[in-house]
Amino acid sequence: MKQKSELFPEVLMEPWKTPVMHDPDFDLTVKCVLQAGDQVHFFLCNRKSEERKMHVLTIPRNYPYRVMEEGYSWAGVGQYFRVKDPKKKTKGNGKSSCTWKLWNTHFIREFNGGEEGKGALSGYGKIKPDKIIHYMVSTGGDVIEFISPTMRWEIHKNIKMEKLLELYAKKRFYERYYG
């Protein structure tokens, strides 16, 4: 269910259902970001079990994304989760999830540009700007943000990071150019 940001009421947000969304023991970290061919792969894992289970989030390369150190993200996407009076209990816009979908953010407006509904992200009027989704994955040290109409989650078990990177670099290259 969408909820309004307390400090930015035009911004709507809701937890995003993902494989890593809110396991309380999941000390999530961004292990690597690989830009290969026309895709960007974010490698996420639990610090304690990195070789047992690696989550890979893949998006197309031609959409905006950024990875920020968590401290700096507080001035960006983190501002939407702040409350007017931190001493008061809030009804649910506390970050119980580490993955979120947001609408009407500055990030969307920045990359949509131009006239209302005429920007690059909205396909020059094909999509209303308030329908564009800003995705966020918050980890123990970094925040991944992106805007993309498609994405893919894959889970890899019992594979070393070096082999996984090799697999993604080679597989994506060969699929694109020789597949």
Image (cartoon, helix red, strand yellow):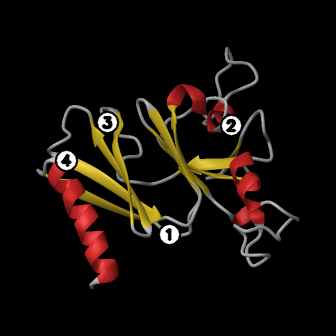
Q: Residues within 10 Å of mark 3 (few under 14, many from 20)?
A: some
- Residue 4 spot, x, y in % from top left: 72, 44
- Kindly identify which numbered label has been placed on residue 116: none
Q: CA distance from mark 4 to mark 2?
A: 34 Å
Residue assigned mark 1: 150
- Secondary structure at numbered mark 1: loop
Mark 4–mark 3 Cα distance, whole angstroms, equals: 18 Å
Give whichever of discs 2 and 3 has the lower sequence position.
Answer: 3
**Left or right of 141 in this view: 90:** right
Q: Secondary structure at mark 4?
A: helix
Mark 2 neighbour class, 10 Å CA radius: few under 14, some 14 to 19, many 20 or more:
many
Dot 2 corresponds to which residue? 80
Q: Residue at x 45, y 54 (%)?
A: 17
Q: Position of residue 166 (x, y in %)?
A: 20, 58
Give the spatial CA distance, label 1 vs label 4. 25 Å
Q: Is residue 91 above or below residue 59?
A: above
- Tell me whether the residue at label 4 lies in contact with that at label 2, contact meaning CB atoms closer than 8 angstroms: no
The image position of residue 163, as x and y in percent, is 15, 54
Q: Residue at x 49, y 35 (%)?
A: 96
Residue most extreme to the front? 177
**Disc 3: which residue:** 26
Nearer mark to the viewer, of 4 and 3: 4
- Residue 170: quarter of image: bottom left
Image quadrant holding the C terminus, namely bottom left
Q: Is residue 47 above or below residue 1?
A: above
Q: Is residue 171 left or right of residue 163?
A: right
- The local secondary structure at tag 3 comes to loop
Q: Residue furthest left?
A: 158
